[in-house]
Image (cartoon, grey):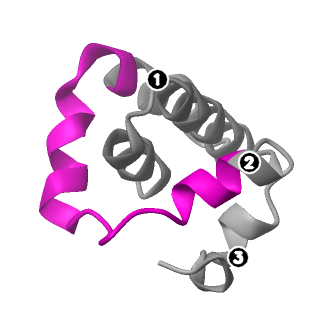
Amino acid sequence: MHYDQLPPFVKESTVFSLEDKTKLAQIDRLPTSQEVDEITSLPEIYELLNAFIGDHSSRNVHLQLKAKEYLQDNQLDMAWKVLLL
């Protein structure tokens, strides 16, 4: 994916640095919706999703923060799965 093809919510994010956004653009293909759904049962993801029910703004920020953690561990695919929840 080219940097210009990043979704607006990623390009406009204040959570991600330019380096983070560049890493996110290095993915060959985005995870499928099935692949994204499969991570919702992971304890850390499940807790995160349930902690911010009804507060979409905070939920999105915390999902981006979680994705940033995965990026720092070079888990690009997992970072994208979290972002696409």
The residue that mark 3 highlights is: 8
Label 1 crowding class (10 Å Cα cut-off): few <14, some 14-19, many 20+?
A: few
Please tell me which of labels 3 and 1 falls first in the chain. 3
Q: Nearer the viewer, mark 3 or mark 1?
A: 1
Q: Nearer the viewer, mark 3 or mark 2?
A: 2
The residue that mark 2 highlights is: 19
Label 2 crowding class (10 Å Cα cut-off): few <14, some 14-19, many 20+?
A: few
Find out whether residue 34 is within the magenta segment.
yes
Please tell me which of labels 1 and 2 falls first in the chain. 2
Q: Residue at x 25, y 36 (%)?
A: 40
Q: Is residue 65 above or below residue 28?
A: above
Question: Which secondary structure, mark 2?
Answer: helix
The residue that mark 1 highlights is: 73
Residue 14, horizontal then vertical, whole percent: 86, 49
- Determine the main secondary structure of the stretch shown in magenta: helix
Q: Residue at x 22, y 37 (%)?
A: 39
Question: Which secondary structure, mark 1?
Answer: loop
Name the quadrant containing residue 21: bottom right
Q: Amino acid at mark 1?
A: Asp
Q: Residue at x 20, y 67 (%)?
A: 32
Q: Relative to 5, is 43 on the left or the right?
A: left
83 or 53: nearer the viewer: 83
Q: Amino acid at mark 3?
A: Pro
Question: Which secondary structure, mark 3?
Answer: helix
